[in-house]
Amino acid sequence: MPRRPAARQRFACTVPRMRVVYDPSHVLHDPVTEVQCGVAMPMYEVPARVESIREALLADDAFSFADPAAHGLGPVTAVHHEGLVSFLADAWGLWRAQGGGSSLPSQFMPDTVLHPALREGMGEAPEPSGAVGRIGYWSWETMTPLVAGSYRAARGAVDVALTAADLLLAGDDAVYGLARPPGHHCPRSAFGGYGLFNYSAAASAYLADRVGRVAVLDVDYHHGNGTQQIFYQRADVLYVSLHADPDRAFPYFAGWAGERGAGAGEGFTLNLPLPAGCTDERYLAALETALGRIAEHNAAVLVVSLGFDTYALDPIADFALSTDVYHEVGRRVANLGLPTLVLQEGGYFVPQLGANARSWLGGLLGSPPGLRTAADSA
């Protein structure tokens, strides 16, 4: 795929348009309770997140919506262990068959997680046959419960990302995949971080198979440990992340500045950890470093893992970014001149998610700052 001219030339029409791929089946993943620091609390990752963004984009004539097409399991198993995929497909039925899910809230999460030290010097553990053992074998934390519709929603999220990738391959300059549950915390052989399948990684690998070099820019507040792990030893997919310093923030065990890739992938990971209270100005300075490295990669396509948990009012984060800066971030990303696939990840201050998404995507489109509705162009 050839490189494209800069964004302000690409989107020269009076009313720029971006296709948004969306699947309503995301609402089937709707756990009630997560456990953070040993405390049970209402879920932050809820269907209202995506629905608030969808409603905001429906009100803006710059966006049109498309349905996802089924892509099968091949792109999923290209980035995930077949055992993980098999477990998630069977998990709810197995849990119910073994007596789980009879009380409310009806959800399923591990009480024991396979820690490497548990079997140090003893070799790998076999996967247990029971539901509780199996979920602890494949999950790595306690904030991602499973419910009856979780697998269907996760498969739908992958199809959203891959359909958006297909539209990009067919000639769209930028496409937005609006999906949940988010996935960038899911490594090859585990699920967690609110996600089941890493659809950003699935789409990136799918694109790399077709166009060669791909760059991933992760701008979620939390480091995308799963995406990093999946591509850590590959040179064709560059992973660049701006995120909270793992010394203080989830996922804690990945995202350090010294992690640069390994083997063939040495030098193809760039982590830019940022301090608490990170301002618009500090963030934009780090973004320039990120974009400079992406420009060096000579990628055919850019994939953006887009998170709005960097927003100043996000309930589980500590950055101080404004809605206005998202427009500038999108504008600077557009100036790379690359076909761009944007995939939604985190962001948990629901009242502002729609405005933040319109601001970021408007910057990518080259629209003027500020919100615009269909009535504005009538």
Image: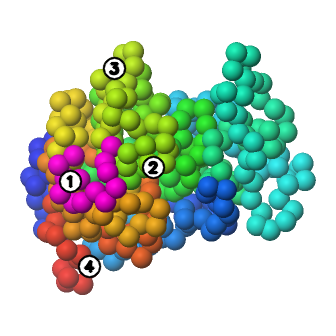
- Indicate the amino acid at tag 1: Arg
- Would you say the residues marked 2 and 4 are in contact, meaning their CB atoms lie under 8 Å apart? no
- Indicate the amino acid at tag 3: Glu
- For the point 23% across and 76% down, the residue is 372
**Residue closer to the observer: 343 or 223:** 223
Which span is picked out in magenta?
Answer: 273-286
- For the point 27% across and 72% down, the residue is 61
Q: CA distance from mark 1 to mark 3?
A: 27 Å
**Residue closer to the observer: 85 or 144:** 144
**Residue closer to the observer: 210 or 221:** 221
Residue 120 appears in the figure: yes
- Indicate the amino acid at tag 4: Thr
Q: Is residue 240 left or right of residue 192?
A: left
Q: Is residue 365 left or right of residue 164?
A: left
* Circle 4 Cα neighbour tier, 10 Å, few/some/many (<14 / 14–19 / ≥20): some
| Label annotation for residue 373 | 4
The mark nearer the N terminus, 1 or 2, is: 2
The mark nearer the N terminus, 2 or 3, is: 2
Q: Secondary structure at mark 3?
A: loop
- Would you say the residues marked 2 and 3 are in contact, meaning their CB atoms lie under 8 Å apart? no
The mark nearer the N terminus, 2 or 4, is: 2
* Residue hosting label 1: 282
Where does the image place residue 9, in percent across and percent down from the top left? 9, 52
Image quadrant in which you'd find residue 279:
bottom left
Q: Is residue 171 left or right of residue 133?
A: left
Q: Secondary structure at mark 4?
A: loop
